Amino acid sequence: MKFKAFLLSGLVAGFGAAYAAAPAHADELQDIKSKGVLVVGVKADYPPFGYLSPSGQNIGIEPDMAADIAKRLGVKVRYVNVVAANRIQFLQQGKIDLLIATMNDTPERAKIVDIIHPDYYASGYNLMVAKTVPLHSWSQVKGVPVCAIQGSFYNKEVAEKYGAELVAFTGVAEALTALHQGRCDAFLYDDTAIEGKLQDPNWSGYDMPLPSQDAQPWGMAIKQGEPAFEKFLSQTVSDWNKTGYVLQLETKYHIQHSKFAEDAHKAAK
Amino acid sequence: MNALAPIADWFRHLNATTGINFTVFYDPFDATRFVHGLWVTIELSVVTIIASVLVGVIGAWGQGVKSAWVRGVTWSYVELFRNTPPLVQIYFFFFGLSAVLPHTHNGFGMAQPLIGGFAWASISLALYAGSFNVEIFRSGIEAIPHSMLEAAEALGYTRRQTYLNVILPLGLRICLPALTNNLVNLIKTTTLAYAIAVPELLYVSNQIWSDAENVPEMMILLFIIYIILVGILVALMHWWERSLRRPGLGT
């Protein structure tokens, strides 16, 4: 009985705190509608997720998602280019209303911004190999020299779990040159970044034949304390999962269907 | 391995209680790669020290010969390798020159360069340190009083005899301190091989601290190991210097 009372009081206190945290006056959803424009932070250097067309327009999977959200709100969309180092600050300062910029959903970030659930995408690590290399499973990687980037958090896992012989360079350009020159048989990197490289005509002879590993979710983010906006975005992502919108975007931008998007679509159907 | 178990336990305990994380003393995977890294650094140091001294001796000879062509080649070599950054040289050899050299084929039937990272690092570091050694040996040779050479000539020494019996022994003694300096520098410069993924000490340390996020601990360890490695070389060189000492030569 005592324990139950304790639980209840905790629950009440929690609700109270959540209610107090939400500013009573500002409702960003209403503000955006009355402004008539949704300002979204996107990447400009991460094809095909967020990049610039030859004429300088923001294009890619994430700008398309932002445009879809704006359409649902009945407002125009405006893009602001962000990088990893400034994207959260832009959101906190109110320079942008919404952030869709290849950001991993981590507990640390969830403390300072509201990350929308469900997550809209996920990226893991994968191998980029020449099409002539017959690679069918991760177990074949044992003893194979694999180029990598020094400091990537998955290097140790690939060396320990799959027995690859890692040849780690300081930067992407060096690792790709080494792959090109045959100093290694594969390049270990983020699957989403490999997708972007594979669209480059210089790398048309290469492929990503194995399933991605250790997928980490990507979440869109808004300022804290906007329950109405958060609910709307959450419903939007759920609706994307139902309609398979993310899969359509992957097709539109010529990348493989990710397991994450396929699973989300299957679960929502 | 059992004898090392208490050490591993102590470092695991240190990490659990203080957060000071020396993974290389208790994580077998990290320990293996760290020891391998230490071994590669030692190999790289020994190979490049021997090769660079040979290059220096040959170069110093090349600077003094009659043929203008040989002197020109030696001069160009010294200017080229002494006056460009060693990291640029390593990249040039590994990525630049390697691309135009013959290839073999690996298990997947893909073209693979003939010369690997370790070999390129050795070649490039030996040539870099060697260019300094040429100048160091020259400084030793030129410090020999001209009267000595005249005396040798007066005693009927041939050019070759003078070089082997007078110039080289005296020159070596004069230039040993400078040579020690350059070889110490060479040991420290072997860390540049990390840029072309030669798994030496700095490279493996970088891998370990990316995984365990223990940069300060690995830095301390690197610091201590290089002090020991360089200390061994300096002690050897001083011992050699003392054993070659001749009363009356130098101060």
Image (cartoon, grey):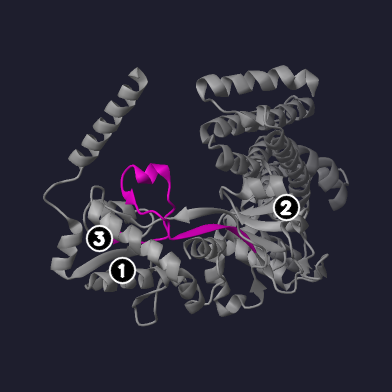
Residue B243 in view of the camera? yes
Kind of residue at badge 2:
Ala
Nearer to us in this view, B148 or B226: B226
Q: Which region shows up in magenta?
A: A98-127
Left or right: B161 as drawn, with respect to A174: right
Nearer to us in this view, B49 or B174: B49
Expressed as whole percent of the image width and height from the top left, the position of residue B71 reads: 72, 62
Q: Which residue is mark 2?
A: A164
CA–CA distance between discs 2 and 1? 43 Å
Subunit under mark 3: A
Name the residue: 60% across, 19% down.
Answer: B13
Q: Say whether mark 1 and mark 2 are on the same chain.
A: yes
Q: Which residue is mark 3?
A: A96
Mark 3–mark 2 CB contact (< 8 Å)? no
Q: Is residue A211 above or below residue A48?
A: above
- The local secondary structure at tag 2 comes to loop
Nearer to us in this view, B141 or A45: A45
- Which of the two marks, 2 or 1, is nearer to us in this view? 1
**Label annotation for residue A69:** 1
Q: Say whether mark 2 and mark 3 are on the same chain.
A: yes
Q: Does the magenta segment cover residue B123?
A: no
Number of numbered markers = 3
Quadrant of residue B66 within the rendered picture = bottom right
Q: Is residue A62 above or below residue B247?
A: below
Kind of residue at badge 1:
Ile
Expressed as whole percent of the image width and height from the top left, the position of residue B79 reads: 62, 60
